Amino acid sequence: MILKSGKEILEKAKQNGYAVGAFNFSNLEQLKAILLACEEMKSDVIVQTSPSAIKYMGIDVVVPMVESIAKNLSISVCLNLDHGKDFDLVKQCIDMGYTNVMIDASDLPFEQNVELTKKCVDYAHEHNVSVEAELGSLKGVEDEVVAKESVYTNPKLAKEFVEKTGVDSLAVSIGTSHGAYKFKGESHLDIERLKEIKSQIDIPFVLHGASSVSDELKSMFIASGGEIGNAKGVSNQNLIESIKNGICKVNVDTDLRIAFTTGIRECLKDKTIFNPRDYLLKGMDMIKEEVKRKVGILNMK
Ligand SMILES: [Zn+2]
């Protein structure tokens, strides 16, 4: 098998106290830039597609595209469904060759979340695919996932949830949110809550909405002609602290969207350019830099 399961990659990270970057993509350029940057860093990677990214690319395209690049790399690559909302899509992705799936039934009542998650776990495990689920929910907008308020993960319920469903990894809600505007003031995560969850459960944890929206990235975006207001992401310090306390998968989408767009817009300032490869390559270069920066932080101890 060319692609590795999420469980295989994340258990290794858990044993060794680092986190693996899980980067979203919607096209060949983003995917290729992510994989090549991780290969340069010799760092395992999870690439993932949201349901709307699948709709955009066509599911038939996704798996062959990832496999055909991954087969020439030395690192382990996992393909994950990000925020699958129903069994049908989860099953479809598993049948197509995804090696990890997330079932996000976090907006359902607890018992229904358990029931749907367990159904996905049973099917996935029969096919050697691992499963991520979510308990508690994050504020913000991730494609079609919209939530007004965060509900932080309850440690006791989380233990019961993991025991009843047999999930391989758990997305926890400890203060991050989806999108570019995460904090009004300083970046802050509920590390005490994470410690409590970790004391109850022995599986890898996942941090969603973990983009940094760094000042450096913001100023490059603005210099290219972009507008981003008072966007604020998760500080490196918070990321490192969360990894010390059990986060093994760090989801990043916004940062790479900003990087890609910055590279392209900067390049298109030259009004004579009309070959898409010229500006797409600049976008890819920006993604590679951002991925390498991020992977460096995730491997810090
Ligand atoms: Zn998410």
Image (tube, rainbow, N blue to C red):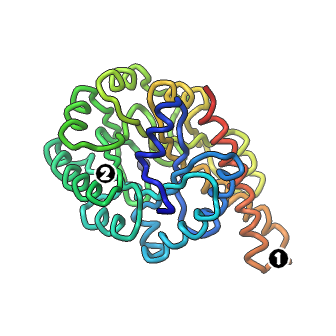
Image coords of residue 202 (percent x, y): 34, 30
Q: Would you place residue 220 above or below residue 212 in this image?
A: below
User: Given this view, does label 1 or label 2 mark the residue nearer the observer?
Assistant: 2
In the image, residue 127 lies at what x, y percent?
31, 60
Residue 235 rendering spot, x and y as whole percentages: 59, 32
Image mark for residue 273: 1
At horizontal 47% and vertical 58% (from top left) the residue drawn is: 79
- Distance from label 1 to label 2 (Cα)? 42 Å
CA neighbours of label 1 inside 10 A, class few (<14), some (14 to 19), many (20+)? few
The quadrant of the image that shows the C terminus is: top right
Residue type, label 2: Asp
The answer, for residue 44, to whether it is visible in the render is: yes
**Residue 105 shown left or right of residue 38 in the figure:** left
Which label's residue is closer to the chain start, 1 or 2? 2
* Residue displayed at 68% across by 48% down: 290
In the rendered view, would you say 239 is above or below 266? Answer: above
Queried on whether the Cβ of the residue with tag 2 lies below 8 angstroms from ligand 1, the answer reads yes
Q: Residue 241: which numbered mark, if any?
A: none
Q: Which residue is mark 2?
A: 104
Image coordinates of residue 27 in percent, x first then y, are: 57, 69
